[in-house]
Image (tube, rainbow, N blue to C red):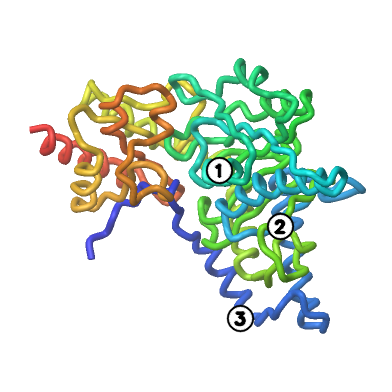
Amino acid sequence: MKKFIYLDHNSTAPMLPAVANKMSECFSAGFVNPASQHRPGQMARKHLEDSRRKIAELLGAKTLGMDTDQLIFTSGGTESNNLAILGLINAHDSNLANNQGLFAPQHVLVSSVEHPSVTGAAEQLVRLGHSVDKIPVDSLGVCRVDQLDSLINDDTKLVSLMLANNETGVVQPVKEVAQLCRDRGVLFHTDAVQAVGKIPVNFSDLAVDALSFTGHKFGGPRGIGGLILRHGLTPTPLQFGGFQQMALRPGTEDVAIVAGMETALGIFHQDQNNYYSDVLLLRNHMENELQNRFPDLVINGVGAPRLPHVSNLSFSGVNRQSFLMAADIEGLAISTGSACASGSSELSPVLLAMGLEKNIVENSVRISLGVSNTHEEIEDAIEIISRVLNQLQQ
């Protein structure tokens, strides 16, 4: 089988060898159900809670004192986003029902460039009788903070803005929005799925109320993610029938995959400065070389703060699906946008929200590098992209 150059790390990052080794150690140790009361169960519980504490500390959550933040393990970013948005609104709704015996529609704001797991949860809120409005972005894909204050009203209970966009890599002014929401008494959630393990993320420093992340975006295992909640916040669970994690997310926890995620996050934190500079150098080299060869190339989001490893490129006169298939044949793995919408032929809602011309949106592809990519691979990728473009533009 042809060896692929893998440049789709925003979809999923290959598991780091140290993560696989750590998980293998856990499997070999034979950890049992951490909810069991016998000594083997207690040993598993200790391992699980040690990992929970270390992950929370690495992400800047408070783990000591009376006002400790809470880390809930989930199956990944989608579940974390759903639990945050639906759970926090449903919790507020339940409190109203208990106190007043009636349903009061809540107002929620999400940005116009959110991941489908956020917009899908927002659409479900609308079906339940709540109202949702979208915060606009500018032409670079950055949230219009200047318009947010006027969008918040007396019924607004939650604002959700991602920390970094999954298609363009644009980093959002989350800390500024968090302060605005705090001043207005509104809960604030950030989807940090694409940011954690790529740039430093500190829950306490961002001053958000809820933060979502997942392990497989930074070399951890798939099937494990987390939601950090500020002390005192209790969302309504989406699943029922168990007492685990204070019944907020019931189900038997898997010690091995939690340990794997902890290992991956620890590796990033040990080498985050080198990671940032290395992938940024490769990404910038690729963009510069392609722009020299194809002057009409458009880099979507350039000029805004971006994740160091992401490029969203639009090539003139080249259909994105044709480009993707031709690159795949040549041994280059890239994507056209969110992996959660990869089966869709619709134009990117993110790029459309930026007000880009239709032909730019139609011709856009996403390239996302990772720690395993080498300079030689990027040089080969540049040659493949150039060869494919020359063929398709004839």
Give the quadrant of the C terminus: top left
- x and y percent of residue 22 in the render? 59, 68
Residue identifier under label 1 = 118
Instruction: Give the alpha-carbon distance from disc 2 to disc 1, as whole Å.
Output: 17 Å
Instruction: Give the alpha-carbon distance from disc 3 to disc 1, as whole Å.
Output: 37 Å
Q: Amino acid at mark 1?
A: Val
Mark 3 / mark 1, whichever is N-terminal:
3
At mark 2, the secondary structure is loop
Residue at 43% across, 38% down: 167
Q: Amino acid at mark 2?
A: Pro
Q: Which mark is residue 28?
A: 3
Q: Which mark is residue 237?
A: 2
Residue at 24% across, 30% down: 315
- x and y percent of residue 144 in the render? 56, 20
Residue at 65% across, 17% down: 150
Give the quadrant of the N terminus: bottom left
Q: Nearer the viewer, residue 280 or 392?
A: 392
Residue at 52% across, 56% down: 216
- x and y percent of residue 209 in the render? 74, 39
- Compared with 255, 360 (above or below) is above
Disc nearest the viewer among 3 and 2: 2
Residue 82 in sight from this viewpoint: yes
Disc nearest the viewer among 3 and 1: 1
- Compared with 361, 23 (above or below) is below
Q: Residues within 10 Å of mark 2 (few under 14, many from 20)?
A: some
At mark 1, the secondary structure is helix
In the displayed structure image, the side of residue 206 where residue 296 appears, left or right = left
